[in-house]
Image: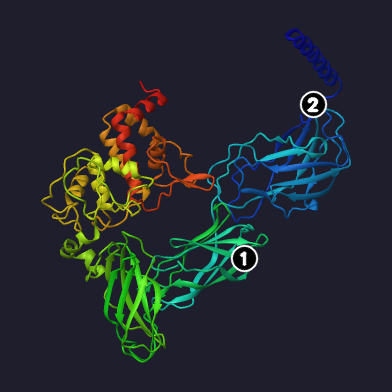
């Protein structure tokens, strides 16, 4: 069998060689023409600027058999490598193009057809053929424009040419590399105009601007509101002018991102649309700060922008000729058995009272700013009202005040701010949010209420039997970390695995991970809102001394505030780096910290936390969660007690048995 195969393989090779020799003696290989020129000598135009003409594009037929048809179709393409922001100017028609003094004899441009969203053009020429090697076709008059910003310089030729008539699919390239650095264009005549500038009013908004660069059919318009506006309820854009299709809104923080749908590419010029409802003006008078309007491609690449859209000035309340309704009385909040916050009050006695607005915020010391409900029973003045806020989870610190509104739109004085932590048995905190931040004596009084105290101050000898951890996905890790004296539960015997971890608990967890004995109470408060006699003061003080934790810009620590997955990952990695007394291991970590973004998580983008998440993923400390067909990390999500414990479990146990260290050294070939 072996001899048979060798014998027949030899025959096949002979046939192939003879066939190739015969072809070579008759014709040159197809697609051996060359392309030169076509690249502008300077930078490409910035977004929104006029298109620029390309220099002559010269095609030279090396073999004399590439341009033998009459007519001949030449496909001129923008090289997609490096130049996705560039397109051909599709306003250039056949009559605007010309053929230079080439030697192939083509004299006429019959037509030019743009396709691929103007990424290529088919130019049909006639009147000649290339009969001998070295003959040329010279194409003149094509133009290019830039559709969005792209800061990186090009590293490849701009123009490709495909001889479609003879052999489509193998385009030849020019040889020059050009400067791609193009800037974001400028929107003009920009404005964001709320229908009402009264303090705290829900109103329609009109967005206007003039664009010189087209917004793609699936492009985006991003309107960024200044801090103080509540845009969470914004609705889709309506009353479109200068742009067709639909505008569907997405909300992220202060950004409203409107996605186009069902329309053609917008023409340049004036654009306007209306956000009919769902935007609430700030609850403070004075200038709002500037807005930003940005047009983008569907992949969020900026096209044009104005970052200084004129600010507005918020005036007082609803106006009118009387003093407005009186203040509600007996305002109180408490947490019910379902861990919902129940608000009660007595309506004021004004006969023209229309509604009571419930204003809320989340976070320690955060002034309420969002209307979450407008409650009243018609003409029920003087009666007790109840509102239950179900949009809370265990561990939330929630702040409320009430504001009455009469039927003329006049506002009465607001109640005091009441703050409460959502946990079993919570009671009202009778201090205002302002007092919690500014008065250290108040901070000492309320700190114990906003941060959970551990089961005991001594390291347990064995894992406690938490009543709510059985069959939980993190049961083994939680019990293991509890047995090591690192993870503590609650006084009632629960662990609350799905509750969010706050900053005080994070400091305690990480301190115990470092292997230190239980800390003593510090002599001086490490932060104004961390009194020396509270259970977590020693942890926070020692972690601050190790330079592992830091406070906010106002000097506070915020012990009851939730900590995000990215923030905790950073702290956990720094703790690991601290306990690993091995320069080789640290060098490996430092290398990862300087490396590329991990591909383990599909939602990870470049941000301050990217190196930490990448390193944690490479070391097997984090695993993320399934999202669609991939895995996500959720960097800005608050981390749960179970998730934090599992991350530390991965670090703690892997470190103790040193398996991961050996794997790292082997993979990185560190000697």
The residue mark sitting in front, 2 or 1, is 1
Left of 153 or right of it: where is 76?
A: right
If the image is split into quadrants, where does the C terminus sit?
top left
- At 19% from the left edge and 55% from the top edge, which residue is drawn? 527
Say whether residue 162 is left or right of residue 443: right
Q: Quadrant of residue 408?
A: bottom left
Camera-side residue: 518 or 457?
A: 457
Q: The N terminus is located in which quarter?
A: top right
Instruction: Describe the element under mark 2 as helix, strand or loop.
Output: loop
> Does the rendering let one see residue 548?
no
Residue 246: which numbered mark, if any? 1
Q: Tell me the tag on residue 29.
A: 2
- Name the residue located 31 percent from the left edge and 59 percent from the top edge: 395
On the image, the x and y values in percent for residue 429 come to 23, 68
Report, in whole angstroms, how far the alpha carbon at label 2 lies from the one at label 1.
Answer: 52 Å
Q: Give the answer, above or below, for where 495 lies relative to 261.
A: above
Residue depicted at 22% across the width and 68% down the height? 435
Q: Nearer the viewer, residue 621 or 52?
A: 621
Front one among 534 and 653 = 653
Residue 137 pos. (x, y %): 80, 37
What secondary structure is found at the residue carrying circle 1? strand
Of pointers 2 and 1, the one earlier in the residue sequence:
2
**Left or right side of 145 for 562:** left
Relative horizontal placement of residue 42, taking residue 504 as reference (left or right): right
């Amino acid at each position: 069998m072996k001899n048979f195969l060798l014998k027949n393989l030899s025959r096949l090779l002979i046939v192939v060689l003879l066939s190739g020799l015969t072809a070579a003696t008759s014709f040159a290989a197809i697609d051996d023409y060359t392309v030169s020129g076509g690249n502008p000598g300077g930078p490409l135009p910035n977004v929104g600027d006029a298109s620029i003409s390309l220099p002559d594009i010269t095609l030279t037929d090396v073999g004399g058999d590439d341009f033998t048809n009459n007519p001949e179709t030449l496909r001129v393409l923008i090289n997609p490598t490096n130049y996705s922001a560039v397109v051909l100017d599709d306003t250039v028609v056949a009559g605007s193009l010309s053929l230079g003094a080439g030697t192939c004899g083509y004299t006429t441009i019959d037509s030019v057809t743009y396709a691929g969203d103007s990424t290529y053009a088919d130019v049909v020429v006639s009147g000649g053929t290339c009969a001998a090697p070295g003959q040329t076709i010279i194409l003149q008059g094509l133009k290019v424009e830039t559709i969005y910003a792209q800061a990186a310089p090009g590293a490849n030729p701009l123009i490709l040419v495909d001889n479609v008539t003879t052999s489509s699919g193998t385009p030849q390239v020019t040889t020059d590399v050009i400067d791609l650095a193009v800037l974001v264009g400028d929107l003009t005549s920009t404005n964001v105009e709320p229908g009402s500038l009264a303090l705290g009013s829900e109103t329609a908004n009109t967005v206007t601007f003039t664009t010189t660069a087209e917004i793609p059919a699936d492009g985006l318009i991003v309107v960024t509101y200044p801090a103080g506006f509540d845009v969470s309820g914004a609705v889709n854009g309506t009353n479109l002018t200068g742009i067709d299709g639909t505008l569907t809104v997405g909300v992220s923080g202060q950004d409203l991102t409107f996605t186009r749908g069902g329309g053609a590419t917008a023409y340049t010029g004036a654009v306007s649309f209306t956000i009919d409802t769902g935007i609430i003006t700030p609850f403070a008078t004075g200038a709002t700060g500037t807005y930003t309007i940005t047009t983008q491609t569907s992949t969020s690449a900026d096209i044009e922008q104005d970052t200084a859209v004129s600010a507005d000035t918020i005036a007082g309340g609803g106006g009118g000729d009387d003093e407005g309704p009186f203040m509600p009385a007996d305002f109180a909040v408490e947490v019910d058995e379902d861990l919902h916050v129940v608000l009660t009050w007595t309506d004021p006695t004004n006969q023209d009272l229309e509604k009571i607005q419930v204003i809320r915020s989340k976070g320690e010391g955060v002034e309420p700013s969002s209307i979450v409900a407008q409650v009243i029973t018609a003409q029920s003045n003087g009666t007790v009202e109840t509102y239950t806020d179900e949009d809370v989870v265990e561990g939330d610190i929630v702040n409320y005040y009430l504001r009455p509104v009469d039927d003329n739109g006049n506002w009465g004085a607001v109640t005091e701010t009441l703050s409460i932590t959502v946990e079993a048995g919570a009671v009202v905190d009778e201090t205002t949010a302002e007092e919690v931040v500014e008065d250290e004596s108040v901070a000492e009084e309320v700190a114990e209420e906003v941060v959970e105290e551990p089961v005991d101050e001594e390291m347990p000898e064995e894992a406690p039997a938490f009543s709510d951890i059985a069959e939980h996905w993190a049961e083994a890790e939680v019990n293991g970390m509890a047995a090591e004296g690192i993870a503590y539960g609650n006084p009632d015997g629960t662990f609350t695995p799905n509750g969010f971890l706050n900053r005080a608990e994070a400091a305690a967890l990480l301190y115990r991970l470092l292997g230190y004995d239980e800390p003593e109470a510090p002599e001086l408060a490490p932060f104004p809102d961390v009194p020396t006699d509270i259970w977590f003061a020693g942890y926070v003080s020692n972690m601050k001394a190790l330079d592992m934790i830091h406070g906010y810009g106002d000097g506070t620590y915020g012990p009851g505030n939730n900590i995000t997955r990215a923030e905790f990952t950073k702290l956990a990695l720094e703790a690991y780096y601290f306990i690993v007394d091995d320069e080789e291991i640290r060098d490996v970590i430092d290398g990862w910290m300087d490396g590329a973004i991990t591909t383990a998580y599909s939602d990870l983008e470049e941000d301050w936390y990217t190196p930490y998440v990448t390193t944690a993923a490479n070391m097997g400390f984090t695993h993320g969660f399934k999202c669609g067909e991939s895995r996500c990390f959720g960097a800005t999500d608050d981390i749960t007690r179970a998730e934090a414990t599992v991350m530390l479990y991965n670090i703690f146990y892997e470190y103790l048995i040193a398996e991961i260290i050996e794997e790292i050294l082997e993979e990185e070939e560190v000697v």
